[in-house]
Structures are given as C-alpha cells and as structure tokens.
Image (tube, grey):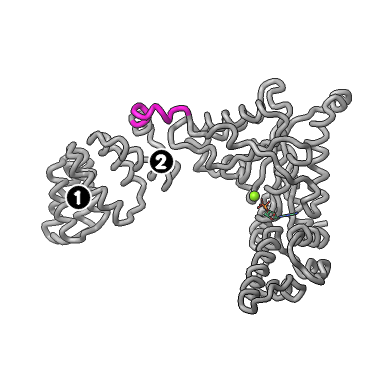
C-alpha cells in the first residue's frame, strides 16, 4: 500500500533533491513499508544534510527493525546525552538494551522514561523487565515503621482555625471517641474530611495535630510513597498502606496533595491512573467495619482536579475550606513561632494586622528571614540583639503574601464550576457572596 506513495515521493525528489521535508516523509514511509535498507539510506542522507535529532531517531528505529540493536543503541545514547527528552527515545533504548542483554541499564532507562511521562507505561517492557527483576516484585513500600508517626502537636499548637477544628471534631473525633452514642441514634459514622485551600495555610499541619489531639498514630501518604514503575504495583502499595493503617488503629490516615492521586484529568482516565483511582475508592469504601478506628483525611490545593467519585457518601463526604489565617490566628501563629526565641517589646497585635493575606507558611518564612538578618547584624556588631518590633516590620515590607495567586484561580472555579455550592466558602471569604 505504501509503494505508490514512495514512488511519488521519489519522483518529486528528483526535481528537488535537497527538499528536506520531502526526504523526511520518504524516509518515514520507507520505514513504515518495512523497506529497511532504503529507509536506512534515506535517513543517512537526511542526517548528512541536517544533522537533525528527529532523523537520527528515525535511523535508530530503522536499525532496531533490522535487529541491529548495538547500532540503534549508539544513536539513542547520543540523543539522550544531548538532552533529548522525548520519552519514546528512552522506551526504544530500553527495548534495544534488552536485546543486548543489558537488563540493569534497560531498567534504569525505563525508569527515566516513566519519570518523563508516567503515562508511557509499556506492557511489553514491564513484562520483560520484571521477570528478571523479581526481587522488586513485592512493591516498593518501605517497612511499616517508616510511615507511622506519633505527633507531639495538638490543636493547641494550631493558631486560630476554629471553624476547621470544630468540623474535624464533629465529623471524625467524636465518632471515634463515642461510637456507641452514634450507634444509639442510628447515625452512621465513617467517611473522611477533605481539607482544601491555598498552600501554606495549615492543612497538613492541622491533620497532624488532629492525630495528636486524640493521641492516635499519624500516617501521612504522598504520591511518591505509592507510585511505582511496575504495572499494578502502585495499587498494591496503596492497599498495603491501608493495611498498615488497619493494623495500627486508632490512627489518622492522611493523604497529602490527594489531587495528584485522584486526578480527574481526562488523561488519567484512559491509562494506569484510572486503576489507581479505582483501587483508592475500593479501599475507602472498605468492607464491613474494615476501616473502623481510621480517621481518613485528605488535603489539596486544587479540589477541582479531584475525581468526583471521591466525594460520595462514606468517602470524602465533608469538604472543608482552610482559609488564610485571620487576624486572631495570625497573632496566635506569630506567638507560637516566636515562643522561646529572644524578643523584646513586640506588639503582636499590630504585626498581625499588617499581615493581611499572609499564609501560616508566609509568617514562618518572615520570622526566619528576620532571624537571619538579626544574626548577620549580631556578627557585624559582635553584640547579640533580641528581635524587636522594628525588625519584623522591616522584613514585612519586603515580603509579599503568597495566597493571592491561589484565590485568582479558585475564584473562577467557585464562580463557574460550583456545583451544589461546593465552593461557596471561597466566595464568602472573598466577599463575593454572603
Ligand atoms: N494555623 C496555624 N498555626 C500554626 N502554624 C501554622 C498554621 N498554619 C500554618 N502554619 C505553619 O505553616 C506551615 C505550612 O503549613 P502547611 O500545613 O504545610 O500548609 P498546607 O498543607 O496548607 O500547604 C506549617 O508547617 C506550620 O508551621
Ligand atoms: Mg500541605
């Protein structure tokens, strides 16, 4: 079927022998037609003309087809050394390396391909490589102790956030402490809390403090703890973590930046990401009482990217906005963070008032910066000085709050994708809606 096209291309090239786009189409077509010697020639002459990476990749593919794996590898290695980040190059290189029996290197290259594009999991490579690599087969989740924390902070260490504390108390702490009462009233317990809001405003911090508050263990899980290069292993890892939680109740099982795990972006639907989401939903639902004693919490800066299935009853059915700290909270955070440090005559109230829109992390950064400056000053003068009001005010002038950017994105979702008032809290906070 390609023969006619090839003839036409050749005819055309007789009139303009140096036409690079034409030549390049000819080479590709010859490769597709499996006319490999001619394809090799065509790519060679292209490379002489242009020294182009795409043509080199074409030549490598041709060598691969010809089972000249060593030659293919030389070219692919050169492309990679030159910083070409096309994951297809890595995938082909890994395949050619298997033929050369260099499995270790093949695994390394496949790993890099997946780092460039997690969607490029390749069933054939997966099968060939994991056979010889059975040791990793169990999944990469480290031993249980690595995950289990015993937080030393509780709600008293969290400045402000009264609304959020109240929600957490009602929704998950009380049911944990008084299950019999809930049963008596026929009220179902279970389900988790999803915290969302601008970065640095205490989502992770309050999740940890929740565990401290009820003296439960804290198990924090991020995407990197779960994702694994081998097909099916990410799901196993996730299951394993739920099992750790089930064996260590009472505990807070916390999924940080959960949007990365439960992304609803359409590209995740088609590929491996979908399996992981399904596994997650299955674990959340649990079978009969399986998740008793586990407080499930999640946090995200981008709730709109989370698959809607996560918000069904019994899953993350409470979604709580964690706003930037208000005046009182900022003052509390300032005091918490400056406690035990040398200070003199600080008017916390006045500083807090000037920190509109600052996140908890901003406040922390501001204090760090002030202390650094103070240190430099002390080295210069040789006399250590306590942190004073003026020092904080002068850092404040140079430090911009970080939450505005988040609100400008969030506002759009709250206005235009606000099904059943999900993001009303954002609008209220921004004083767009009462
Ligand atoms: N309400 C708060 N009280 C005390 N510290 C806070 C508070 N909010 C934020 N912080 C501080 O800011 C840091 C960043 O908060 P974090 O919980 O990591 O933010 P997020 O998870 O929302 O991005 C925390 O480590 C904590 O030290
Ligand atoms: Mg966080």
Q: Secondary structure at mark 1?
A: helix
- Location of the N terminus (image quadrant): top left
Q: Which residue is mark 2?
A: 120
Mark carried by residue 110: none
- Location of the C terminus (image quadrant): bottom right
Q: Main secondary structure of the magenta part?
A: helix
Q: Write the start and end of the magenta stretch as one range.
A: 129-138
Quadrant of the image occupied by residue 395: bottom right
Q: At 69% across and 34% down in the image, what residue appears?
A: 315
Q: Secondary structure at mark 2?
A: helix
Disc 1 and disc 2 in contact, CB within 8 angstroms: no
Q: At 22% across and 40% down in the image, what residue appears?
A: 64
Compared to 187, does 58 lie above or below? below
Magenta stretch contains residue 137: yes
Name the residue nearer the viewer: 303 or 361.
Answer: 361
Q: Which residue is mark 1?
A: 26
């Amino acid at each position: 079927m390609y023969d006619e096209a090839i003839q036409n291309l050749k005819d055309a090239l007789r009139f303009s022998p140096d036409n690079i786009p034409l030549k390049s189409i000819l080479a590709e077509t010859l490769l597709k037609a499996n006319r490999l010697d001619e394809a090799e020639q065509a790519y060679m002459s292209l490379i002489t003309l242009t020294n182009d990476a795409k043509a080199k990749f074409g030549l490598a593919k041709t060598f691969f087809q010809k089972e000249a794996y060593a030659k293919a590898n030389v070219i692919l290695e050169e492309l990679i050394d030159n910083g070409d980040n096309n994951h297809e190059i890595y995938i082909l290189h890994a395949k050619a390396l298997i033929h050369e029996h260099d499995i270790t290197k093949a695994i390394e290259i496949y790993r890099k391909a997946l780092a460039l594009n997690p969607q490029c999991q390749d069933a054939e490579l997966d099968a060939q490589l994991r056979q010889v690599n059975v040791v990793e087969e169990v999944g990469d989740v480290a031993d249980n102790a690595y995950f289990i924390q015993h937080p030393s902070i509780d709600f008293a260490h969290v400045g402000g956030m009264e609304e959020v504390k109240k929600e957490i108390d009602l929704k998950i702490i009380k049911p944990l402490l008084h299950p019999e009462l809930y049963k008596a009233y026929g009220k179902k317990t279970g389900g988790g809390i999803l915290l969302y809001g601008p970065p640095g405003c205490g989502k992770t911090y309050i999740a940890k403090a929740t565990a401290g508050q009820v003296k439960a263990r804290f198990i924090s899980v991020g995407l990197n703890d779960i994702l694994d290069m081998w097909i099916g292993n990410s799901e196993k890892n996730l299951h394993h973590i739920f099992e750790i939680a089930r064996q260590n109740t009472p505990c807070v099982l916390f999924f940080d930046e959960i949007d990365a795990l439960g992304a609803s972006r359409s590209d995740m639907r088609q590929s491996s990401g979908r399996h992981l989401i399904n596994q997650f939903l299955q674990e959340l639902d649990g079978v009969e009482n399986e998740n008793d004693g586990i407080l499930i919490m999640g946090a995200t800066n981008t709730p709109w990217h989370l698959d809607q299935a996560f918000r069904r009853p019994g899953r993350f059915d409470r979604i709580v906005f964690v706003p930037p700290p208000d005046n009182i909270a900022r003052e509390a955070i300032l005091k918490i963070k400056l406690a035990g440090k040398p200070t003199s005559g600080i008017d916390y109230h006045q500083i807090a008032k000037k920190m509109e829109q600052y996140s908890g992390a901003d406040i922390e950064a501001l204090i760090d910066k002030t202390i650094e400056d103070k240190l430099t000053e002390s080295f210069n003068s040789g006399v250590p000085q306590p942190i004073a009001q003026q020092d904080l005010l002068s850092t404040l002038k140079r430090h911009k709050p970080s939450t505005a950017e988040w609100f400008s994105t969030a506002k759009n979702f709250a206005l235009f994708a606000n099904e059943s008032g999900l993001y009303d809290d954002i609008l209220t906070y921004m004083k767009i809606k009462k």
